Image: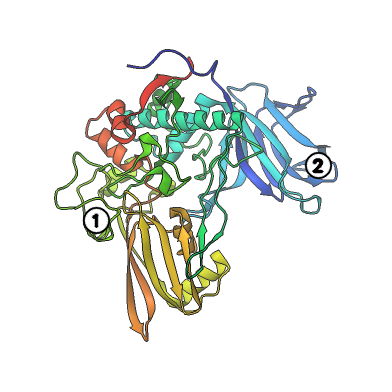
Amino acid sequence: MVMRAPIFPSEPVVSIGLLADAEQIRFTLMGEFRTPDGRIVPPGRYRATPHPAGIEIRDAQERLVGTGATFLLRPMNPAMAIFALEEVPIGKGFHWERKEAQRYAGTLTIRVSSSLSETSRRLTVINEIPAETYLKSVISSEMSARAPVEFLKAHAIISRSWLLANLARRANEEEPSPLLPERETSETPELEIRRWTNRTAHREFDVCADDHCQRYYGLAPVTSDAAIAAVTETRGQVLTFDGQVCDARFSKCCGGATEAYRSAWEDRDVPYLQGGRFDGAEWPANFPRPLTIEAHAITWIMGSPPAYCHMTNSRRLDDLLPEVDRPTRDFFRWERTLEQEELQALVQARLGLDLGAIRQLEPLERGASSRLVRLRIVGERGSVIVGKELEIRRVLSWTCLYSSAFVVFPEDVRRGTPRRFRLRGAGWGHGVGLCQIGAAIMAQQGRTHREILAHYYAPAEIALAYT
């Protein structure tokens, strides 16, 4: 049953940051666009660069098109005219990072980035489209548009929920700040660095187009009628709790158990994101819990629980995962080795600390899914405590570890110093909320989108945000 009292007056228009802090922008107009003063800009290739007046636009023949503080173009025929950008970064900071050309519908705005000084001007590209149009791309970028329609419906609802909750926070200026490095005092003072990435940190636009917010790869991923139908048939539907739209988080693979909100972001409990839910029918009897206990976490990570997201069938995975994720196969259980020299270099680069030879990676605190929330790195010249989960993943990898749910095995220890550390891990992502692969398998097994949402977000309920 969907509650029928709309929460929002109408469908919002979303501003999406496609590029930020770019030295120049190369774009192509496919169809006619119009500037705010009524001037028509014809189809063709263009280049935008910083200019003392703000921005300079030139066409493919290097003829000046215009200069100004902002360059805004609206399609004359929204159903036909689109634009394309070259070298759009995706997966920034993660193991699938790359650049691609992408096509978009809606309004194109190019402006000078506000975060940089006058002497180092860069450009920001913003796309404005209706929320429902945005969601058709999101659910097809996050997972494959060929995934089961009941999964796509569930994803449309949670992606809409996260979007509207984010817009509401921005409107109310409720933006929790990430914790900065801080020094803990005790009998033996020890530096503790706790950081997280705040998804509401953008100032120039509502959401970004990459994993920091939700993936939005433009028009290309929307390749099936099912993806369009999933958004259309759930139009305006969101998850709510206690009268508020849910901040519905999700990750690629929980590894068998979901994580709590506080393990990845602020130190607060979110009732529908409590963590500790088994990604299966019922908790397997041969795995003791809670997974916050180190011995239980080790058994869990080293084991192979029968979770929905424990999927190894390549053909079925290709039907679920978008192209950018298909090369990753070892997400449920994985292994990485860090050589001593590499680990020292990572600590220096990520934290600005020279701890000398690293002697120990010591788990201090785990969340409900076994993910590490606090990790002590002990070196010959000192030690540091690192958290939360994403910061741990970044400190121990030049890209980003799949997750912070791992067990550490020192190897070739000489005079107390290992030559390398082998990590055995579980899951891909922060593990909070819906497990994308697990939810897609649930849909393949015949579960409805309502059953999927109840599995991951109870006690949240479906409501209508707008008609």
Residue under pointer 1: 300
Colour scheme shown: rainbow
Q: Nearer the viewer, residue 133 or 169?
A: 169
Mark sitting earlier along the chain (2/1):
2
Q: Give the residue type at disc 1.
A: Trp
Residue under pointer 2: 54
Q: Position of residue 393 (x, y in %)?
A: 44, 58
Q: Is residue 339 visible?
A: yes
Is 247 placed left or right of 70 in the picture? left
| Quadrant hosting residue 258 | top left
Q: Give the residue type at disc 2.
A: Gly
Please name the residue shown 57% across and 54% down the image: 180
Does residue 292 lie above or below 168 as drawn?
A: below
| Quadrant hosting residue 423 | bottom left
Q: Secondary structure at mark 1?
A: helix
Q: Nearer the viewer, mark 2 or mark 1?
A: 1
Is 436 placed left or right of 177 in the picture? left
Q: Residue furthest left?
A: 285
- Quarter of the image for the N terminus: give it: top left
Q: Nearer the viewer, residue 101 or 335?
A: 335
Q: Is residue 322 visible?
A: no
